[in-house]
Image: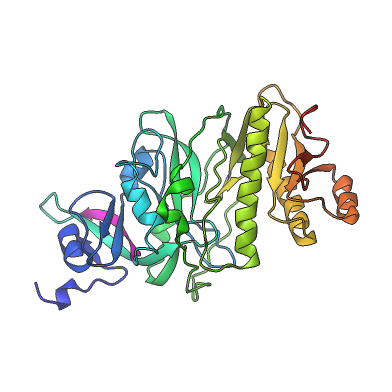
Amino acid sequence: MTASAKVINPGDVRTRTEIRAAFGGSPQGGICPSEDMHSVNLYSDPDVGEQAGYYDGWLAEGDELGSVFEYTGAGKSGDQTFDGVAGAGNRAILRHAEQDRVLRVFTRVGKLPGSDTKTHRYLGTFTLDGMEPYVWRRVHGEDGQERSVVVFRLRQEGEVQHAEQDVIPPAEETTAEFVPFRAVTAAMFQSDPATSSALPLPKQRVRKGAAGRKAAPNAETSGTFVVPEAFSTKLSLRAATAATVAVRHEAELTQAYKGFLDSAGHQTGAFQIKVKGLTSTLRTDLYDATDHVLYEAKGSNSREDVRMALGQILDYSRYVKAPGRGEEPKRVILLPAAPTPDMYTLLDRYDVGVVYQSDDGRFVGEAVPKGEQ
């Protein structure tokens, strides 16, 4: 094979043998690291993913940084993990920046004529989103059992193919499923060397020249009660800006208050919300199922953060339904310190409470379980 034959550009269709010649990796598996080629090759198979309860692809709804490609981690049955042999592939994605590797994404398109050799289309190079590298999501596996999967949020690192067929299908129907609290943790965040590494911020902040896309109808929603996951309470991000510090503080605050509620005998979790007609999945910060309280946490008590939290919790609380509870949940904003009196006045207008952490570590607020403040 000549050197020119090894060149693969976004949109090109190749066999895995040809891909390995250009970018390395193993002959099988969905997550294939290559030390020599400084690459982690990610293979997505739409048919397999749908059977396993998930979709990989572009979100139709972008944000201020551009588009996000969601890629579901390794593990077809049971809860996915970052630990041990089962979590090796997921760790390879999480550590790609510190190991000086890029993420290359391929999606299966078919087979070579007259053979069983699969072909894959190259989408391009990516990196993990620096602010939210992954989220935990509850799905129904091919065996019908609920499980937790890790969904990586990828940002384009260079030239990519952004094809319409790679956009995640929008939600088609409304479902509301209550899932009891079940601890699914990534213990490696507390001790693994990966926690001292840095996640890169995307080089290309806004995708230019993107084709316009019709807005999808937004009529119905579904809510699923799931376990909250602090995606990284001690993760050091490359850009130590106020925003990234606030993200870390928010995760730590949420985890601390969750632990406090758990110790008081409360059942805690979160709500996973899918809006009909949209491809993205919303996730609340914390839900106290015992007292029917929805929390939105922020990493600071600034005016900007309080106003953002107010909008989010008013939005999310519309969709939170719990067995035996006809009313919407009590809405509470969780903060690391008390807001200004003026912000209390604003929140009172919308019947939104406040819980904050005092200097001595206690949690203060009307929603805090009685006798525990």
Left or right placement of residue 102 versus residue 291 in this view = left
Instruction: Determine whether 34 is above or below 48 in the image.
Output: below
Q: Percent x, y for residue 123?
A: 34, 64
Looking at the image, the residue that sits furthest to the bottom is: 4
The residue positioned 28% from the left and 61% from the top of the image is 121
The residue positioned 10% from the left and 76% from the top of the image is 2
Q: For the stretch drawn in magenta, what is the main secondary structure?
A: strand
Q: Does the stretch in magenta take in 146?
A: no
For this rendering, which residue is in front, 320 or 196? Answer: 196
The coloring applied to the image is rainbow
- The quadrant in which residue 5 appears is bottom left
Q: Percent x, y for residue 211?
A: 49, 70
The span shown in magenta is 101-110
Q: Is residue 330 visible?
A: yes
Looking at the image, the residue that sits furthest to the front is: 360
Instruction: Determine whether 324 is above or below 319 in the image.
Output: above
Q: Is residue 218 visible?
A: no
Looking at the image, the residue that sits furthest to the top is: 324
For this rendering, which residue is in front, 214 or 197? Answer: 197
